[in-house]
Amino acid sequence: MTGAEWHAANDAYLGLAMQWLELLLESHSSAEPLLLTEERRAKPRGADEPSPSSSWWANLRRPTPDSTAAPLPAVSEDVQLRIDEAAAKLRAAEQTDPPPAMIQLAQRMGLHPFERDLLLLCVAMELDTRIAGLCARAQGDASRPYPTFALAMAILPEPAWDAQSPLRPLRYYRLIEISQAGGQPLTMSALRADERIVNSVKGLEHLDDRVAAFVTPLADPGTATLPESQHTVAQQILDALAHDERSLKPVQLLGRDSESKQLVAHAVANARGLMLYRMPADMLPSQAADLETLMRLWQRETLLLPLALYLDAQDLDRGNENHAVPLKRFLARSGGLLFVDARETWPVPRGSHTFEVAKPTSLEQRALWLEVLGESELEEAQHLAGQFNLSAAAIARIVSEAQGGDPSVPLEKRLWQRASEETRLRIDALAQRIDAKATWDDIVLPPLEVALLKQIAVHVAGRSTVYDDWGFRERMNRGFGISALFAGESGTGKTMAAEVIANELGMSLHRIDLSATVSKWVGETEKNMQQLFNAADDANSVLFFDEADALFGKRSEVQQSQDRFANIEINFLLQRLETFRGVAILATNMKSALDSAFLRRLRFIVSFPFPGPTERRAIWEKVFPAKTPKAELDYGHLARLGLTGGSIHNAAMSAAFLAAQRKTIVTMPIVLEAARMELRKLEKPINEADFRTVVA
């Protein structure tokens, strides 16, 4: 049956249903009140009278011994025959495949026949203008042009008292709305079908507006390929759900990468034929009544539509009761397939399925890059997989954007640029990015130190080969990061060396802003550092901790509470540095101030000595840009001045400004004048002979 054919059959079914209901209402219409008279309603029920039941309602039209109401005429055989014929046609129309929307709804909601017919009566109010008047006539009261429980029990077959129960589907799932004024009996209150249900019965399926305000469709992963490790997790989830069909438990997806968890959730939802919607956990209402309404409406939607919910609690503050308590309530009573994106397990009274979801392994990421680059570009794929730690969805997105880029730029370069931009977004918000311009030609250090710096670059570039191809990753569970300590006086080239390494590897350089990281509040510094390390784990970036002794100082003897919290902070940094997967460079001019435990966790320690005359001469020769107009300078003489590379740079800048002010080129006297100013600033002794010789 095509969609158009089904809608035609559904409309035909509803037309037959309207005819049947009209006949029922007309057959019970009378000038006299259908229910008990006012006198009888006012009289209390005696102890010998039966309590309300389906049989009581079935015999409601029969005159009671003390009733002042005149007996109502019985339904004629002709009318009853017409009712039976209409009922037979209606039941026959239910046999289509697939059945009419009303029948499907009743099956999904667990309605028994009386509840189904009662809901159909309420829906009829919206579909047939005659129903309101017939309801008023059947109740003998023009002020009641609406269905009630009492009316339904009087006219519909198989009346059931429990249809009024708040635990039955009609009321629990808000299929009907009850307008009960103060003091009015429930049985006499107006009933109305919910708008969403009316549309569903008409065959128009859409998400309830009250639910749509909280959820959005979870973005389709598109061309992203599910890696084997994540496919295994998805299959484990499907196996667990297969044994849990009657009452699905929440599926908690643990881990730091939301994109990988969403990809797994999509795979499971697609396998079960469900559409996946996302709801931020902090949007759950804090008021119990509002939360209960949202929860029941969502449960209703999962029965009406093939839906699953992805509840994003990744960054939810567990200490905030306005967020944590509603989430726990929602998990305790949720219905349908529910995924919870969390870093740690949330307690669920009725239990849950918990699975760890990680990013694709390095080898799987390499395979994803090879799909784009081709098998001939294995080295480039290794390089990308070694430098970037990305989800399958992120790789697919980068590939799509890079392929649509400038064709004059090689694809490999476009991929690298897009991957760098992708991973830099999070860390840019947490650290200060430095534009790395220095190269190996710019830095001046003794040969041993230069060799150590080049070894750092070699270790970073070769991570994929050593860890994955040569099997070291299988034997290690930590220590995958590259960490180094640069120790030396201020101005000896530590920052420039970090720039050189970042530039050599095509990585961004981020300096840690201590003002945004260190907090006086207990636990805040650790929280800030955790966010920073998490972002840097995945980014193609070098973390540069300038003045590292401020963060990685020695632990002290606990004499007061502040000492204990300070030690906890250092212990956290020790643990996190060991599990860090990226590149970290610590710089300090007070190596002795660092805790010795940090030194063990560092792969390289590079000392930056005070430059000797040879190094100082080389620095002076390189310090002025080629465009700077200058006279012949005596670099041998300038090398006698006891300045570090940073101070030499400052002196050269000052000389350039002095020359520009005097509208002349940079000369030796101007350079010496600037150097004298730098020595005075540093409060270093000045040997006047070093300045008189040249000037004379």
Image (tube, rainbow, N blue to C red):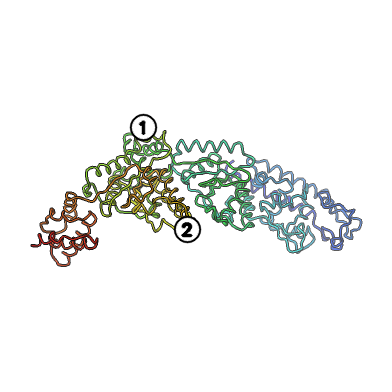
Label 1: few (<14), some (14–19) or many (≥20) C-alpha neighbours in 10 Å = few
The disc placed on residue 560 is none
In the foreground, 659 or 554: 554
Query: Residue 34, image x and y in percent?
Result: 82, 58
List the residue tagged with mark 1. 470
Three-letter amino acid code at the position of disc 2: Trp
- How far is disc 2 from disc 1 in space, using C-alphas? 45 Å
Q: Nearer the viewer, mark 2 or mark 1?
A: 2
Q: Earlier in the sequence, mark 2 or mark 1?
A: 1
Crowd band around label 2 with a 10 angstrom C-alpha radius: few (<14), some (14–19), many (20+): few
* Foreground pick, 165 / 273: 165
Kind of residue indicated by mark 1? Trp
Q: Is residue 246 above or below residue 428?
A: above
Return the residue at label 2.
521
Which residue reaches farthest top? 470
When asked about the image quadrant of residue 103, the answer is: top right
Count of numbered labels shown in the rendering: 2
Secondary structure under tag 1 reads loop
Residue 495 at x, y percent in the picture = 29, 52
At which x and y percent is residue 271?
Answer: 53, 39
Give the side of residue 489 with respect to residue 581, left or right.
Answer: left
In front: 501, or 478? 478
- The C terminus lies in quadrant: bottom left
Is 298 left or right of 608, judged from the image as shown?
Answer: right
Relative placement, left or right, of 33 versus 1 is right
Quadrant location, the N terminus: top right
